[in-house]
Image (spheres, rainbow, N blue to C red):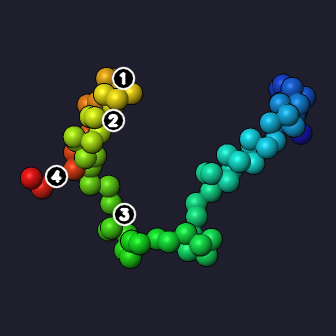
Amino acid sequence: MASLRGGPALAVTLREQMANALLYRSLARLRTVEDGVAIPEASASELEWRGAPRARWEAFCDSLGLGRLRARPHRWLAESR
């Protein structure tokens, strides 16, 4: 079995950052109804991404100075006027 290059340093870092590693693992885990998370969508089609709300997205980007991200969504949500 080959050893991991930098393994000892990685082990030290993981040991020092174990609380963060466990937090990030928990945050990345998909939640379910069994976990007590309400899932209002009843079908897969309700989960389809229909686009970003343009005015809200642009205002968000402007408020944080994210000019390069302002036009990034490739689909805008069709908003009723």
Disc nearest the viewer among 3 and 4: 4
Disc nearest the viewer among 4 and 1: 1
Residue at image coords 32%, 55%: 49
In primary-sequence order, the first of circles 1 and 2 is 2
Query: Are the residues tagged 4 and 1 within 8 Å (C-beta)?
Result: no
In primary-sequence order, the first of circles 4 and 1 is 1
Secondary structure, mark 3, is helix
- Can residue 69 be spotted in the picture? no
Three-letter code, disc 4: Ala
Residue on which disc 2 sits: 60
How many angstroms separate mark 4 from mark 2 (CA)?
18 Å
In primary-sequence order, the first of circles 3 and 4 is 3
Disc nearest the viewer among 1 and 3: 1
Secondary structure, mark 1, is loop
Three-letter code, disc 2: Phe
The numbered dot on residue 78 is: 4
Residue on which disc 3 sits: 47
Residue 22: image x %, image y %? Answer: 75, 48
